[in-house]
Structure formats: C-alpha cells, structure tokens
Amino acid sequence: MELNENNIPLDPLENLSYKARYDYDLVQKARNGDQNSFAELMDRYRDSIYFMLLKMVQNKDDADDLTIEAFGKAFNRLDLYTPNFAFSTWLFKIASNNAIDFIRRKKKNTISIDQAMGGDDGDEMYMDLKSDALTPEELSIKEQKMKIMRNVVQKLKPRYRQLVEMRYFEQLSYEEISEKLELPLGTVKAQLFRARDLLFEILKSSKENI
C-alpha cells in the first residue's frame, strides 16, 4: 500500500478526475458481473476507440473488428486494472497495442509479387511465389476446421448464432447486418462482441481444437 510522507495510506482515486472515478465505479460493478456496467463502458468509449483504430488501420471493417477485440481483451483483464491511472488510458493502450500487432501481422503476411527487390549484386530481382491455391490436404484440413466451427456456433443462442453466421460465414459488413436485422449498428456490434466471447468460452471448454 502506498503511503504519503506522514505514513498515511493514499487514496488511489485521489488523483483521478470525476470522469475517471465514475469509470472506476463501473469497472468495480463489471468485475462483479453487472452487464449494464459492461454495456455503459462500451457506450462511453466505443466511438473514440473505433476512430483511433480507423486512423491506424485505414479500413472500416478491420477497425470494427479491432474495436470489439479491444473491449474483449480489456473486459477479460479487468482484474489487472488499477486506478493508478484512468480506465480510458488503460483501454486505449490495449486497443493501440492490439492494432499495432494486427498491422505487423498483416505486413508480414503481405508480399507484392510486382515489387522489385535489390539483389546482392545491385541488380533488381522479383519474388517467384508459388500459387496461393490450397493443396488437397490443406483444403481437407480447412473444411474440417470449418465443420468444427459450425458445430460450435450451433451451441450459441439463436440471436448470437445468427449474428456470427452473417458476419463470419456470409461475410456481411456490420452495416449490412444492421440493415437486414433492422437493429441499431451499436447493438449489432455489442452483441457480436458478446457472441465472440461466448464462442471463446465454448472453445476453451471443448475437447476439439480449431
């Protein structure tokens, strides 16, 4: 416990603004399983997190997915949050670090076959890449994994199952799902976050791995 110069315990909330104290109260309630507090924290920061991520990744769908991932990671680590700094600071750090990892993975997996590279002798050379087509074995493995995933998705409640199928199997955008289901865009994103969280829990407790 941190003490002041008179050896009196310091209030960890003392240096926080009213807004940050309010967030901390929501975090405490969320830690105890209060779903309304989870929802309110998302409502308070969803848009600002999204626009920060959009500037980083320059793609709306990627920014949407990363926003959901950021809240998922934060909510799963609430026990690690301390009020030494504002919850928003902690949340934005998680979101930005996650986006940086995403950008690194994307760059690592992207090679342009048209981009010339400098050879050791100063001449330019081009990458001779093999076809992206899957081998029969790889295709079989992919189909098996998809079958397992569909079986896991079937264990979700109907409303969550429908959202996951539309987003990940039919590959519809959030806006398209919102329009088809006649639901507010924010509701679609929040429920997809919950659906992904439930899927993760099912997969953790399942004997089958994807």
Image (spheres, helix red, strand yellow):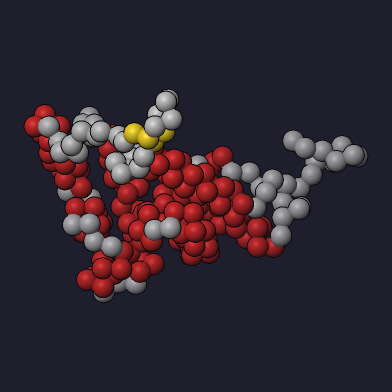
In the rendered structure, the answer to whether residue 88 lies left or right of residue 1 reads left
Closer to us: 83 or 107: 107
- Of residues 36 and 96, the one drawn nearer to the viewer in this rendering: 96
Left or right? Give the position of 210 relative to 60. Answer: left
The part of the image, by quadrant, that contains residue 21 is bottom right
Q: Residue 47 at x, y = what percent? A: 49, 65
Question: Is 80 situated above or below 15?
Answer: above
Which residue is the extreme one toward the right? 6
Circle count? 0
Name the image quarter holding residue 137. Answer: top left
Q: Is residue 161 visible?
A: no
The answer to whether residue 186 is visible is yes
In percent of width and height, residue 195 lies at: 31, 52
Taking the image as shown, residue 99 lies to the left or right of residue 177, namely: right
Query: Which residue is drawn at the image coordinates 69% and 62% (left, top)?
Result: 18
Vertical placement of residue 151 versus 192, above or below: above
Please state, as top left, top right, bottom left or bottom right, where the C terminus lies in the image. Answer: top left
Q: Residue at x 77, y 37 (%)?
A: 2
The N terminus lies in which quarter of the figure?
top right
Q: Quadrant of residue 5?
A: top right
The residue drawn where x is 50% and y is 49% is 95
Q: Residue at x 87, y 37 (%)?
A: 7
Residue 89 picture location, percent across and down = 61, 52
Q: Where's residue 176, x and y in %?
A: 26, 68
**Which residue of the protein is positioned furthest toward the top in this rendering?**
120
